Amino acid sequence: MLRVLSLLILIAIWQIIATMANSLLLPEPAAVLGTMVREARSGALFFNLGMTLARVVVSFGIAMLFGTLFGIAMGRNRTLDKLADPWLVVLLNLPALVIIVLAYIWIGLTETAAIIAVALNKLPNTTVTIREGARALDPGLQEMATMFAMPWQTRFRHVLLPQLAPYIAAATRSGLSLVWKIVLVAELLGRPNGIGFEIYTAFQLFDVKLLLAYALPFIAIMLGIEALVVQPFERHVSRWRQKAA
Amino acid sequence: MLYNLSSDMFPAGDRKPLEIVVKRKAFRTSSGALSEVLRDVSLTIESGKVYALVGPSGSGKTTLLRIIIGLDKDFEGSIVMPQKPRIGMVFQEPRLLPWRSVFDNLRLAAPQAGDKEIVEIAADLGLSEHLKHFPGELSLGLARRVALARAFVVKPDLLVLDEPFVSLDILLAERLRDELATLVERTQVTTLLVTHGIEEAVRLADSILLLGGRPTGIMARIDIKTPRHAMTDAYAAEIQAQIGAIFAAAS
């Protein structure tokens, strides 16, 4: 309940400042809501939200999949770790903007370029987190699995994944918020739709109402995903911990 | 209590013995020098018998054990096994999957075992009440029992126990030891027990190998002729004294 109260206070402060400023550059909450409803009625809001969400999901999925694989490989193999670590550092420090622009130049202004660029931004991040997890794997359980001749599927599902789960959850949490921000930049620079594109349009028109009408629903969606997907997943994978004395 | 496991579940048969010869095992220390841990250790493990490797802490018992079960391949010598034995391993720490229930831990180790068998073996080790619990909810004693049950559900050709009673209080350790003795008797499983406890070795083993020296070798072998269930306290004490004297003379 405190969370709701906190949000209400935020909206109240917004209302007060907007009333005092009395400027088109800071519209009142009600005005933004009006624009939101208008855009929703025309279907444009849902279409653009959907496009952005789809890009977030696909690029996030790719980054998590490959980041996890690379992370496990680098965490388990020292030579590979030493070989690939400098690449990782370069990628980690490459600004998102540079990757996006290069992807558009080299691949073209396409969906593929946008997705690859966003995934590449998130990939090193996931790799580093999962690598930590792979380094911390319990060798005792590994030996146990060997002695009991567990097949690789069993090892993967019941020995490896549960140990990595907290790291995967951490990468997911930091990843979702990172990815959606980068998707907006990619859209702004080279896509004909999505929240990022609409924000670009709003910027050119100096239409703050439109800008907020698109940005706020998407924040709400990401909060929803966090509360309805990420947190239940975390609870599920750590249920054995809560029951432990 | 122990009525379910029968020897026909663990066909000892007329298997050929396992021949273990470790000529030399050395570790490289942090300074780069080679430190020899084991030299000229050879033993023959005949099927259906119980062997105890006894030695003080740091004598290379666990190292030898890891060589025998194939977790350590970096040594000079040979391990000859007629066919690859199915090993039921009990590590020093229980090494259970903390995120799986007791039942699932047993199930995952032995996917071919029927639910009924798993439940029966768990019952034999007093775990019936705990099948749905997570390992984190169990005491060390109970976790050890789960690890022991896990080694039995795979129907091992060779049961290997690494200090299975260490850090349990005496009463608990004695009870578990007696239950294990009954199980081993009943199943006739070939067993290799590593321990620093002389009494548990005397109570469980047919043959006791005393490890000592530097680098470690087998100092003496003591065969116990009396069947386990017929062993008197006086006889056990006599052998313990004999072993104590050998260790005292060596140090």
Image (tube, coloured by chain):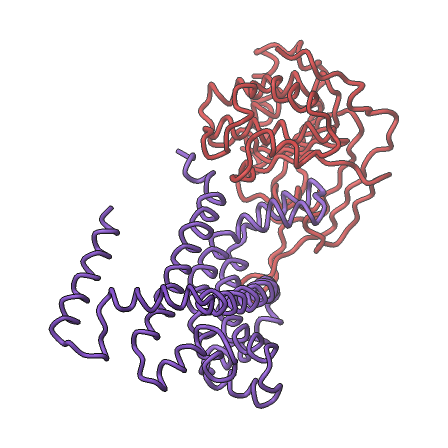
Chain colours: A purple, B red
Who's the residue at 67% across and 36% down the image?
B109
Residue A117: percent from left, percent from top: 54, 78
User: Which is more toward the observer, B81 or B43?
Assistant: B81
Q: Looking at the picture, does residue A154 appear above or below residue A245?
A: below
Which quadrant of the figure has residue A210? bottom left
Who's the residue at 55% across and 32% down the image?
B101
Who's the residue at 74% across and 50% down the image?
B23
Residue B63: percent from left, percent from top: 63, 46
Q: Looking at the picture, does residue B20 appear above or below residue A109?
A: above
Residue A22: percent from left, percent from top: 15, 76
Horizontal relation, residue B31 to residue B63: left or right: left
Who's the residue at 45% across and 46% down the image?
A232
Quadrant including the N terminus of chain B: top right
Q: Is residue B79 among what the camera can see? A: yes
User: Which is more toward the observer, A5 or B24?
Assistant: A5
Which quadrant of the figure has residue A17? bottom left
Instruction: Find the residue positioned furthest to the bottom.
Output: A105
Q: Is residue B31 among what the camera can see? A: no
User: Which is more toward the observer, B26 or A71?
Assistant: A71
Horizontal relation, residue A165 to residue B123: left or right: left
Q: Looking at the picture, does residue A5 appear above or below residue A19?
A: above
Residue B65: percent from left, percent from top: 66, 41
Horizontal relation, residue A9 to residue A235: left or right: left
Instruction: Find the residue positioned furthest to the left.
Output: A20
User: Which is more toward the observer, A167 or B16?
Assistant: A167
Which quadrant of the figure has residue B224? top right
Q: Looking at the picture, does residue A220 appear above or below residue B196?
A: below
Horizontal relation, residue B249 to residue A221: left or right: right
